[in-house]
Image (cartoon, helix red, strand yellow):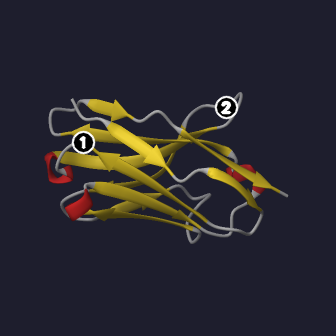
Amino acid sequence: QVQLVESGGGLVQAGGSLRLSCAASENIFRINVMAWYRQAPGKQRELVASVTTRSGGTNYADSVKGRFTISRDVAKNTVYLQMNALKSEDTSVYYCSASDYSMNEYWGQGTQVTVSS
């Protein structure tokens, strides 16, 4: 059972930056893919960015390409989401997820990001 703890959300003005962190309870090399999703009120949860923990390969939603960067720190078992040039439409609850090699999926509790215009 992988436990994920997110932090770093908050209130920021449009054009500002935030960095989200997701700390995993075990060595992230035992996890296949880690990702950030978001869900705004009344909308479906959507994939924001993902990283394959061993190769470091990344994938981004079109809406955040060029503004958000996902990265991992293996020594700290932590994945980050650096969010720059934030827009009001980025306002959501952001969730960290982990998918292991047995296709089990784990979720964090979510962290609120609010961008004021």
- Look at 15% across and 39% down and name the residue there: 101
Tell me the element at label 2: loop
Q: Quadrant of residue 73?
A: bottom left
Of 99 and 63, which appears nearest the observer?
99
| In-image side of 102 versus 44 (left or right) | left
- Return the residue at label 1: 25
- Residue 13, image quadrant: bottom right
Identify the image quadrant of the N terminus. Answer: top left
Q: Is residue 43 above or below residue 51?
A: above
Going from the N terminus, do you reach mark 2 or mark 1 first?
1
Q: Which residue is located at x 16 percent, y 53 percent?
A: 29
Give me the residue at 24% from left, 35% from top: 2
Dot 1 falls on a residue whose secondary structure is loop
Question: Badge 2, how many Cα within 10 Å: few under 14, some, many 20+?
Answer: few
Residue 79 % position (x, y): 36, 56
Q: Residue at x 51, y 37 (%)?
A: 110
Of 67 and 109, the residue lying toward us? 109
Marks 2 & 1, CB-CB < 8 Å contact? no
- Which residue is at the far right? 117
For marks 2 and 1, give the CA distance. Answer: 29 Å
Q: Quadrant of the C terminus?
A: bottom right
Classify 14 as above or below 2: below
Between marks 2 and 1 in the image, the one whose residue lies nearer the viewer: 1
- x, y percent for residue 18: 59, 62
Instruction: State the image coordinates of residue 32 (x, y, percent, origin top left).
Output: 21, 47
The label number, if any, that marks residue 115 in the structure image = none
Name the residue type under label 1: Ser
- Tag 2 residue: 43
